[in-house]
Image (spheres, helix red, strand yellow):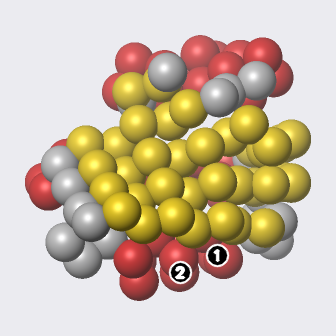
Amino acid sequence: MNIVKTSEGSKLTLALEGRLDTTTAPQLEAEVKGSLDGVTELALDFSKLEYLSSAGLRVILAAQKVMNKQGQMIIRNVNETIMEVFEVTGFSDILTIE
C-alpha cells in the first residue's frame, strides 16, 4: 500500500493506494499517529483503495476517535466494494463519507 500525504495548514489528506489489510494497517496506523498533531481536518482519499479488511477498519476507527476530539475526519472517493464494507459493519453510520 502507498500513502500519499498532503498537508495544508491544519488540514491533512492521506490518499491510500492498494490494499488496507492486516499487512498494511500498521503502516497507516503509524502515519496517522505521527501526523495528527495540530490537524483539525483529516481527509482520507480512497479513490485508489482496492480492498479494506477488519484491521483497516480498526485503524480508521482509531483515527475517527482522535479526530472527534480535535476536529473532523472525512472519507472521500469510496468505491462500491468498500462502501458495502462500511454499510455491513455499521461504519457508514459513524463516519463522514463523501
- Residue 2 position in % (x across, y down): 78, 67
- Within 10 Å of the Cα at label 1, are there few (<14), some (14-19), or many (20+) other Cα atoms? some
Q: Is residue 24 above or below residue 30?
A: above
Toward which corner of the image does residue 25 lie, by quadrant? bottom right
Residue 85 in sight: no
Please give the residue where the numbered disc 1 appears in the rendered image: 26
Q: In this view, does 59 lie above or below 5?
A: above
Please give the residue where the numbered disc 2 appears in the rendered image: 30
- Residue 19 position in % (x across, y down): 84, 54
At label 2, the amino acid type is: Ala
Estimate the spatial distance between the alpha carbons at disc 1 and disc 2, rounded to whole Å. Answer: 6 Å
Q: In this view, does 75 lie above or below 44?
A: above
- Within 10 Å of the Cα at label 2, are there few (<14), some (14-19), or many (20+) other Cα atoms? few
Helix, strand, or loop for circle 1?
helix
Extreme-left residue of the structure: 69
- Residue 73 position in % (x across, y down): 35, 43
Helix, strand, or loop for circle 2?
helix
Left or right: 65 in relation to 26:
left
**Residue drawn at x 40%, y 18% as measured from the top left:** 93
Residue 18 in sight: yes
Q: Which of 47 and 86 is in front in this view?
A: 47
Decide: marks 1, 2 in contact (CB < 8 A)?
A: yes
Extreme-front residue of the structure: 8
**Residue drawn at x 67%, y 21% as measured from the top left:** 83
Left or right: 76 in relation to 71:
right
Q: Which mark is residue 15?
A: none
- Residue 3 position in % (x across, y down): 69, 67
**Residue drawn at x 25%, y 43% as measured from the top left:** 72
Toward which corner of the image does residue 27 lie, by quadrant? bottom right
At label 1, the amino acid type is: Pro
